[in-house]
Structures are given as C-alpha cells and as structure tokens.
Image (tube, helix red, strand yellow):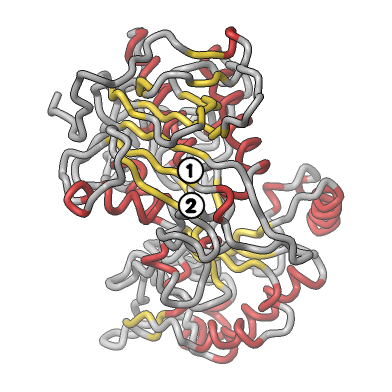
Amino acid sequence: LANYWGYNTIGYFAPEASYSSMGSRGEQVLELKKMVKALHRAGIEVILDVVYNHTAEGNQLGPTLSFRGVDNGSYYLLSPESPRYYMDFTGTGNSLRMEHPHVIQLIMDSLRYWVVDMHVDGFRFDLASTLARQLYEVNLLGTFFQIIQQDPVLSQVKLIAEPWDVGDGGYQVGKFPPLWTEWNGRFRDTMRSFWKGDAGKLPELGYRLTGSSDLYHDTGRKPYASINFITAHDGFTLRDLVSYNQKHNEANKDDNRDGTDDNRSWNCGAEGPTEDKAINELRLRQQKNLLAGLFFSQGVPMLLGGDELGRTKGGNNNSYCQDNEVSWLDWRLDDAGRELLAFTRRVISIRKTHPVFRRRKFFQGRKISGLDVKDIAWLRPDGQEMSEEDWQGADVLTVGVILAGDAIAEKGTNGQPITDDTFLLLLNACHEESQFRLPGQGSSWELLLDTTRPATAKPMVQRRKSFLLAPRSFALLRERPERPGRKAPPLDRIEASGQGSGRGRAIPMVCHKS
C-alpha cells in the first residue's frame, strides 16, 4: 500500500513529484509550467487541487518534518485540554491553525505563487470547512475568507470549495461566501437516490435540476455556484455505483472499515460483475440516466475521469492507497464502454450547443415579462402541470420538465438577447414504463436522446400524442413548431412503433412497488 494520491502536503510551493514524468530530476516546476501553457493553448483552464487543511506531520505520533519543529503551537490547532494532542477535523491527524497570521501568510503566499508564477486559473480547496475553523466552530466570515475576498489577485480566479470536513458542524454546503463555488454534495446525493428509485425525492430533485436556488440564491450567488457531480475521486466510480450495494475495501487492509457507508448505490440485481445480460443492460442505462441528469442540470457539471469509459475499482470506494489496477484507468473499451463514451460525448455536445442548459440566472417559474410563456414548467405523465399535491407524492418517480428557450431573459456578452430551442426532459426512475402525453398544440417533438437507444441513433420526430417512456430511463425531446406550408419530415425519421395516443388508458402518476 502507498499514498498514491499524494494528498499529504508538506511543501506548499512544490508540485507533487510523483506526478512528473521527469521523476527525481528536480524539473517538476518547469514541466508543470509547460503543461499549463499547453492546456491554455488548447483552450483548457487549469484548476489546482490544494490541501491547506492539514500536513503530512500527522498527529502526536507522526514525524517532525517542518512546521511542528519550527512552531508547533502556531501552525497547528492543539487540544485546549491537552496541548500534546492535535485537533483533527480532517481524519489525517492534524488541522492547521487558520487564525494565526503566519499560517494565513503562508497560505496566501502559496496561492499567489501558483497564480502569478505558475499561471493556474483557480483552486479546488480540499475539506474547505477546516479553513474556517476557529478552534471548534466553523466561521465562514473568518480571516482566511476575508483576505481572499479583498486580494487583488486571488479574488479574480476560480475558487471551488469542498464544503465539508469530518468535524462536528463541518457540512457547510450552500453556506460559503460570494466569489466561492461549491462541490454540491446534495446534488450528488439527490441524483443517486432518485435514479435508485428512493421515494419522496422529487421536491429535492426539482431544486437540484434547476441550479439549487435553495442553497445559493439568498447569498446572491448564481446557478454556476453549484459544482454538480455524481462521483468524485472519493467514493464509487459511476460504474461501481450501479454495480455494488456495499463498499468492498478489503484490499485496503482495514477490515473494510474505511471509506463511507453512505453510498446510495444499487447493484441492479447482482453484487459485482455478472454475465446476466438484463442486469448489464440496466446498469448501462442507469449510468446514462445519471450522466443525463448531470449534464442537463443547471450549474457546472463535473465528470470524474474514467466514468465516461465505464471504469471500475471493483467496489473500492477509498482507493487512495492502491497504486495498481484498482486505481489505474484501463483504456481498453468493451462494447458497453464504447457506448458510454459515445453517450457522454453526445450529452456534452448538446449542453455546449444550447444555452438553455447553461442559464446564468435562476428560473422564475412564471410567465416572463413581455412573453406569454413560462421559463420552466413541470409536467405529470398526463401532460398537465404538477400541483402541490403531486410534488408531495412519496411514490412519484416520473416527471417531465419543459425548458423554454425563448424565455431565458438573459443577455449575451454584447448585450444581445439569448434565445434557444424549447426542450422537454422526461425522467422515469420507476421500474414500470410510463405513457407520457406530449404537451403543446401545433407542435411536434423531436427525440434527440433516449437512454434505451444507442447514443449514435438519429433524432426522430414524434408524431403521436404521447411518448412511451421505458422503465428507468431518460429522454430528451426538442420542440418543432409547425409552420404553414412546412413539409412533413421523411417517414424514416418518424418514430411510431410502441407509441400510443394515450387515449382510453390511465397514465399513472405514481410508481407501484416492485
């Protein structure tokens, strides 16, 4: 076992040597500068993951490497009852004393160095709640955040918080100050639970799909304050999330006690690898559903590297110590991996092309001034708008969302109005199919994406009055307003098989228990 991730910092001005292809030649700084320049030329920004919450000196049993020997009581939070011991809000043995001026100076000098000399575009702060700790309490108006706010260099770069630590009161999602964006752990948990089929998640899902206004609106922040994610380096990969009910960390040699137990995962019928075709098809569809939820939600999507390939860690959800096949990426793709990669490319392409999925203001949910259309509407399977009673239904797992492209009500960089197509998102986390009545009069809908179809399938115009939404599936449709004299689409682009009018049969709102 080894510290494969390199998260135990001791030199805050030095790139991690093991990440360098030049190894021990001492040219890591030069190589990192070249990397940043190359990425910038390709139009890619660089966000540096920084760990200012603890150091590699650990607790009282750890080695004395630097800060402990220089001034132990100034650099570290010590236990008031017994200063021999360290306050540990990180799970790694110690926590830096963020209210001490020399600690603040060290961190600010380090951050400026990475921006001014190394030209990174921003930072992701590991366990950022620890940076606001003043002894026991989390104070998000503390010294560190006040200095960042007024710094002429650092206030201009991207600041991303992992808004929690392992101490009491450390879960601070939605509570960081302006300028800061956050890993939205509630988005992760809600999306996992909804697509797993957990009851009563629809109200929470409504907030997460629309940018989490309940978390960020009151502090004056916008939807892009929410860094949405399903998986990260901590925890299951996307494939493992749909393949395991429990973590399998036995290889870490801690009797499977390490790593979180709150995975909100579902193995789709068998624990781990299986030859069952139906289970494997369901797992692929569930991965697609989660990716669609990620990229078609308002906010900033974050994709874990390898999830687009169907990467597995064999159920290990704490692989920091595994420098082997558990952690490595296998670039060889099977059929499922190729399909998942094609699907990921497809959803990214749609998101990049259509600003309705990248709003910079929260939805209003009402008719926009000067327009006879709502910017967003939530639909039942019968095509009617959802009522308050519908929202509170514990067994409601099927919903439609209309995003009106002509009601964005935002301006572009040159002051021009931003308009787009109108889209219909259909989500069905139920194990039963749902006949979804399509809204609108004088319009047809074009099926762009369906997680039951191949990612490369061509769009098809829906001529029926309803759409048959398969069990545990997601579909994306685009409105095609009919115009006088407009020619009908070719027959090979009209989807009719399996579609009914929806007349004469009930369109269920609730999901019956399996």
Question: Which quadrant, please, contains the C terminus?
Answer: top left
Q: Position of residue 429 (x, y in %)?
A: 30, 32
Q: Is residue 33 left or right of residue 355?
A: right
Decide which of 153, 403 is in the foreground and name it. Answer: 403
Residue type highlighted by circle 2: Asn
Q: Is residue 250 visible?
A: no
Cα separation between marks 1 and 2? 7 Å
For residue 294, which numbered disc appears in the image? 1
Residue drawn at point x = 29 percent, y = 84 percent? 82
Tell whether label 2 touches label 1 (CB within 8 Å): yes
Q: Is residue 79 left or right of residue 46?
A: left
Q: Secondary structure at mark 1?
A: helix
Residue drawn at point x = 37 percent, y = 39 percent? 400
Residue drawn at point x = 34 percent, y = 77 percent? 85
Identity of the residue furthest to the front in this view: 484
Decide which of 315, 475 is in the foreground and name it. Answer: 475
Q: Position of residue 9 (x, y in %)?
A: 58, 63
Say above or below: 349 vs 507. Answer: below
Label 2 belongs to which residue? 228
Q: Position of residue 443 (x, y in %)?
A: 51, 31
Dot placed on the residue nearer the N-terminal end, 1 or 2: 2
Decide which of 79, 163 is in the foreground and name it. Answer: 163
- The quadrant where residue 346 appears: top right
Q: Secondary structure at mark 2?
A: strand
Decide which of 238, 205 is in the foreground and name it. Answer: 205
Q: Is residue 34 visible?
A: yes
